[in-house]
Image: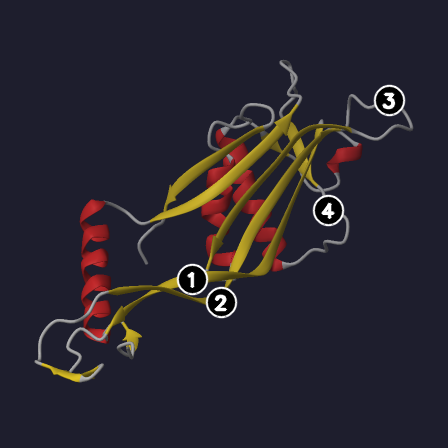
Amino acid sequence: MRAMRMQKIPGRWLVAVLLSTLLAACASGPRLLRTEVSSFNEWPADVEKSYSFVFPLGIVDSPVQRNLQTLVAEELSRQGFTALPAGSVAGSAHLAVSVRARVTPKQHYVAEPVLYDPFWRGRWDTMWMPPGWYGGFAGYREYPVTVFERALTLNIDDVRSAAPGRAARRIYEGSVTSVGASPSIEVLAPYLVRALFVDFPGMNGQVRTIDVPVDAP
C-alpha cells in the first residue's frame, strides 16, 4: 500500500492559530518576560548601606556598563542604599557593587506538527478514492533555531569588614537569566534588573521563576 503524501500544516491554518493566540494574549494581560533568578547571600543584620561601584575583572567603562550601573543604583536606592562616587571603596563606602552582563547564543530544537494532506485526491492502492477528508496528524518534525540566553550577575562585597591584606567578604551574589530570540541586552536590562531585586536579597541558595511585566513600546 502506498502511503499518502505528507505536508506541513497549511499556511492559512497557521496564521489563524497565531492570530487567535495573539488575541488571547492581549486579552489576558500585559506581556511578560520570564526569568530565572538565583541568589546566594550572607547578609549581615547590621550591614552599612553605603556603596560604590567597581568594575568586574575584564570589564571596562562603557555606555552599556554605565547604563547597567544606573539601573542597579535605582533599585538599590529603593532598598535604602546610598551611592558614593566611584573610587570611594577605599575611603568611606562600606560595600563594593559590581554588575556584569553577557549574551550567549544557544541552539534549540522546535517541534512542528505535520498532517496528512487533508483534501488528498488520487489513487490509493488499486482504487481511486472519492474526494473527501483523508487527513490526520502524522507526527512532529524538528528543526533547529538560534535563541539567546541574556544574563546579569550582581555581586556585593563588604570591604570595610575585611581584615588588612585580606579579600573583601562577599555578602551577596545574584544572577538572572532569560532565554529568547533577541540578543539585545540593552533593551532587556531594565526588566532583568527588576527581576533580580524582587524580594531582595532573597533566600540563600534559592532559584525562582519570575515573570516581569514588559512595558508596551
Relative to residue 178, is residue 117 depicted above or below?
Answer: below
For label 2, the residue is 144
In this image, 167 relative to 123: left or right? Answer: right
What is the x, y in percent for residue 46?
A: 64, 14
Q: Which mark's residue is nearer the viewer, 4 or 2? A: 2
- Front in this rendered view, residue 110 or 33: 110
What is the x, y in percent for residue 55?
A: 72, 47
Q: Residue furthest right?
A: 165
For label 1, the residue is 110
What is the x, y in percent for residue 178?
A: 49, 49
Q: Earlier in the sequence, mark 2 or mark 1?
A: 1
Q: Which mark's residue is nearer the viewer, 1 or 3? A: 1
The answer to whether mark 2 and mark 1 are in CB contact below 8 A is yes
Tell me the kind of residue under disc 2: Pro
The answer to whether mark 1 and mark 3 are in CB contact below 8 A is no
- Front in this rendered view, residue 104 or 111: 111
- If the image is split into quadrants, where does the C terminus sit? bottom left
For label 3, the residue is 163
Q: Earlier in the sequence, mark 4 or mark 3?
A: 4
Q: Residues within 10 Å of mark 4 (few under 14, many from 20)?
A: few
Q: Secondary structure at mark 3?
A: loop
The answer to whether mark 1 and mark 4 are in CB contact below 8 A is no
In this image, 191 relative to 102: left or right? Answer: left
What residue is rendered at 65% in x and 28% in y? 50
Q: Residues within 10 Å of mark 1 (few under 14, many from 20)?
A: few
Q: Quadrant of residue 52?
A: top right
For label 4, the residue is 56
Q: Residues within 10 Å of mark 2 (few under 14, many from 20)?
A: few
What residue is rendered at 50% in x and 36% in y? 75
Q: Earlier in the sequence, mark 1 or mark 3?
A: 1
What is the x, y in percent for residue 216?
A: 31, 54
